[in-house]
């Protein structure tokens, strides 16, 4: 057993060394992603144009930090980026159709029509390419979640995930109480979409 364990450790060490060399070659190759420092600098310095008026990214970020739900928004973004990054590291990919579907769902959820698309993306500090990059993150997150039961040994099932989140948020206790009292379930939560369109309508003469 000891010899087997040592052989296993040697094999793992050799595999890790090969992966490390591949990672170095990938970082040196063409089309590499910008580093975290570069991304942070761009986030602060890039200009967003809202109605033709330029606003620096650092100003938008500073304003977002003052929101009451800033922590929740930050955690949602971090969770999505971590899941998408984990998926890429595992070799999971999404095709162009999945990206286009995620992009369409995102814009439809905010009630952004075709005629408003360019102005909306500009007000988000995005062009078409960067909007598709963001949609790819969403598609990757969805793909990782869909594969959740298979990405870990004995991974969680969708119902197990639903139950754990429901217990943390109190929805489990609420559902149990409703079943005892034979009260109908809550209607589906309303979508937050349409806020951007509403804001634009309010500004129009």
Image (cartoon, rainbow, N blue to C red):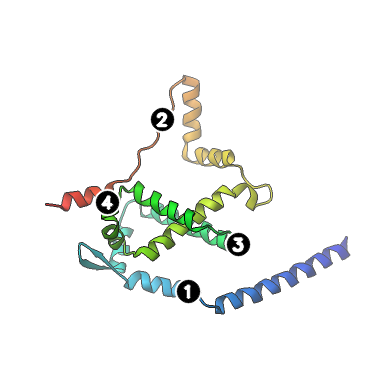
Q: What residue is at 25 percent from the left and 67 percent from the top?
A: 55
Residue 136 higher or lower than 40, as above or below? above
Question: How many residues crowd around disc 2 within 10 Å: few (fewer than 14), some, or many (20 or more)?
Answer: few
Q: Which numbered disc, 3 or 2, marks the residue that appears first in the sequence?
A: 3
Q: For the residues marked 1 and 2, what is the alpha-carbon distance in whole angstroms?
A: 45 Å
Question: How many residues crowd around disc 1 within 10 Å: few (fewer than 14), some, or many (20 or more)?
Answer: few
Residue of label 4: 196
Residue 159 higher or lower than 135, as above or below? above
Marks 1 and 2 in Cβ contact (< 8 Å): no
Q: What residue is at 50 percent from the left and 74 percent from the top?
A: 31
Out of 153 and 201, give the one closest to the viewer. Answer: 201
Q: What residue is at 54 percent from the left and 52 percent from the top?
A: 143
Please state the horizontal and vertical placement of residue 77, each as a whole percent of the image: 43, 56
Query: Which secondary structure lies at badge 1?
Result: loop
Q: Quadrant of residue 49?
A: bottom left
Q: For the residues marked 4 and 1, what is the alpha-carbon distance in whole angstroms?
A: 31 Å
Q: Which numbered disc, 4 or 2, marks the residue that appears first in the sequence?
A: 2
Q: For the residues marked 3 and 2, what is the alpha-carbon distance in whole angstroms?
A: 39 Å
Please state the horizontal and vertical placement of residue 5, each as a whole percent of the image: 83, 63
Query: Which secondary structure lies at badge 3?
Result: loop
Residue of label 2: 186
Q: Which numbered disc, 4 or 1, marks the residue that appears first in the sequence?
A: 1
Marks 3 and 2 in Cβ contact (< 8 Å): no
Out of 115 and 82, give the one closest to the viewer. Answer: 115
Q: What residue is at 39 percent from the left and 51 percent from the top?
A: 104
Point out the frontmost of discs 3 and 2: 3
Residue 49 higher or lower than 77, as above or below? below
Q: Is residue 63 left or right of residue 99?
A: left
Q: For the residues marked 4 and 2, what is the alpha-carbon distance in whole angstroms?
A: 27 Å
Q: Which mark is residue 24?
A: none
Residue of label 1: 35
Q: Which mark is residue 91?
A: 3
């Amino acid at each position: 057993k000891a010899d087997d364990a040592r052989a296993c450790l040697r094999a793992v060490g050799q595999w890790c060394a090969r992966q490390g060399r591949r990672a170095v070659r990938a970082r040196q190759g063409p089309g590499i992603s910008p580093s975290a420092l570069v991304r942070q600098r761009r986030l602060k310095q890039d200009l967003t144009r809202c109605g033709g008026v330029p606003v620096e990214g650092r100003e938008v970020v500073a304003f977002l930090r003052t929101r009451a739900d800033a922590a929740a928004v930050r955690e949602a973004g971090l969770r999505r980026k971590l899941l998408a990054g984990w998926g890429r590291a595992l070799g999971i990919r999404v095709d162009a159709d999945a990206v286009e579907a995620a992009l369409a769902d995102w814009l439809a959820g905010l009630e952004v029509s075709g005629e408003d698309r360019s102005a909306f993306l500009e007000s988000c500090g995005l062009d078409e390419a960067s909007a598709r990059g963001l949609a790819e993150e969403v598609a990757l997150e969805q793909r990782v979640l869909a594969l959740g039961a298979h990405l870990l040994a004995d991974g969680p099932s969708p119902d197990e995930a639903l139950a754990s989140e429901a217990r943390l948020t109190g929805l489990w206790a609420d559902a149990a109480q409703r079943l005892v009292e034979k009260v109908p379930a809550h209607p589906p939560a309303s979508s937050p979409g349409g806020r951007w369109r509403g804001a634009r309508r309010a500004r129009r003469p």
